[in-house]
Amino acid sequence: MSAIRTGPSRVQQRSEPGIIPAKDMAVIWVLLAAAFVAILNETTMGMAIPHLITDLGITPIAAQWVTSAFMLTMAVVIPITGFLLRRFTTRQMFLSAITLFSIGTLVAAFASGFTMLLAARIVQASGTAVMMPLLMTTIMNLVPAASRGRMMGRVSVVISLAPAIGPTMSGFLLDHFGWRAIFVVVLPIALVAMFIGWRWLTNVGETTHAPIDALSIVLSAFGFGGLVFGLSQIGGLENGTSWMPMAIALVVGVTGLGLFLWRQVILQREDDALLDLRVFTSRDFTLSMTQMFLLSLAFFGSITVIPLFLQDALELSALDAGLVVLPGALAMGLLGPVIGRIYDSRGTKILLIPGSILASGMLWLISTLTVDSSIWLVLVAQTLLSVGLALSFTPLFTASLASLKPKFYSYGSAVIGTIQQVAGAAGIAVMMAIFTAVTKAGGGTEVPAAVAEGTRTSILIGAIIATVTIIGAFLIRKPEDDGEGGGHAGH
């Protein structure tokens, strides 16, 4: 397909390698702020579920859909963002995303009932899903290779600090003002970001006139949506939930995904794919995505189980359990820019090798915890686990996208988001199912020793998965070091 330039080539305007013009940095800061707000909102509703049950008079299963519907919408929308970011300009995508997010937030703040709140969350998620791919694609288009690690480190700050702050902020607002206050606080921040973006955000990269393939959108929704929904139901099987909805969802998901991928292979011959799979012709991109999938499997499952161990086995309060895991989240975020600078100057292996060893080692340690284990041991292990993951995620983000041609940046960003969503759902599903089964066999969550056994068994799965990533750490390279910056995907 022919492409039209929506803005001047900024790379050509730079006089020094690694220098980012102030105007470009302003664009990145606007997108970072918007992504932070969106992810912050994503992590706030889990603690509000008991309040929603009481205030709206709904069942726990219905209340859970406030978070499940958000996750499902993200899983459906993220895969198509690669096409949308090439089809529409930076300003169009940003303003559409932040407008959807703001409208959803406003409606949620004044929701008169559960149905209205659920619809608002879906609208919010539609905007949120665009934010991270848009941010990562823009960074790749604006930032020279010598500074990409540093900028991706700032993305790590957003990804890590927002989830760390979200539950704490949510708990304070719920205790003092009620669940609507969560949306009331987020809305003005989103509106400010919208105004700044409308006033100063400029277009970067190129756009195409490729038609939107409606069949691909439908297949993507059934494929990724069915897969994530089916995986999310696995954990409930031990509680007497029927296996039929899960089985149907997984069959629909696998079938839809297969047809979606087949459709993309056909469409990409004319550069019309919704998600161009030629990104996987890059060796470094494929290896990085495999590594990220395995790390996400182990990480998201583990951080779901560890708080349960703290509360039900060590018998800490929810607040104390949150404080135990908080240092890890803060360390993961604050180390992002430092790790990015190391990537820029030293490449991948100096980060990925110790990162994978540290992450897997800490999971093996956590898999030995008992009811007599020290809280400080859990705190140190969980913090070092987060450090290991921080050492891994920033170089994986950067090396994977740097191995692609610029025209594939948006598709690569969409693949990263999709893999994190699917791997996260799978990791949580598998490890929670194992945790629930083992704990139930030992007497249930009322028996601390049973909870500890469930934790050890489920975390052991994560440790085994993470150990495999040590091999990948030796194989992934910084594309610029091999003379492959700009990538070979698409040849």
Image (cartoon, rainbow, N blue to C red):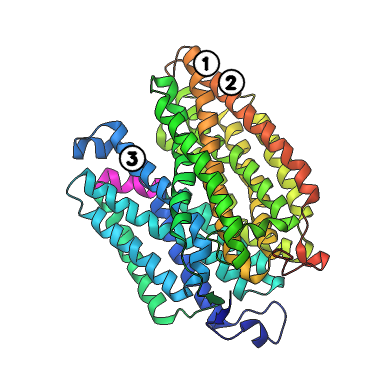
Mark 3 belongs to which amino acid?
A: Trp
Marks 1,2: beta carbons within 8 A: yes
Q: In this view, does 327 lie to the left or right of 130?
A: right
Give the distance between the C-alpha atoms of the residues marked 1 and 3, in whole angstroms.
31 Å
What residue sits right under mark 2 in the picture? Answer: 370
Give the distance between the C-alpha atoms of the residues marked 1 and 2, in whole angstroms.
7 Å
Percent across and percent down for residue 205 are 57, 77
Give the secondary structure at mark 3. Answer: helix
What residue sits right under mark 1 in the picture? Answer: 449
Q: Earlier in the sequence, mark 1 or mark 3?
A: 3
Q: Is residue 292 above or below residue 338?
A: above
Magenta part, dominant SS: helix
Q: In which quarter of the image is the N terminus?
A: bottom right
Neighbor class of circle 2 (other Cα within 10 Å; few <14, some 14-19, many 20+) is: some
In this view of the protein, which residue sits in the foreground, 364 or 434?
434
What residue sits right under mark 3 in the picture? Answer: 65
Q: In this view, does 136 lie to the left or right of 44?
A: right
Question: Can the viewer see residue 316?
Answer: no
Q: Which residue lies furthest to the left in this view?
A: 112
What range is drawn magenta here?
Answer: 167-177
Give the secondary structure at mark 1. Answer: helix
In this view of the protein, which residue sits in the foreground, 77 or 156?
77
Of circles 1 and 3, which is in front?
A: 3
Percent across and percent down for residue 255 are 52, 40
Q: Residue at x 65, y 87 (%)?
A: 13
Of circles 3 and 2, which is in front?
A: 3
Q: Is residue 479 left or right of residue 312?
A: right
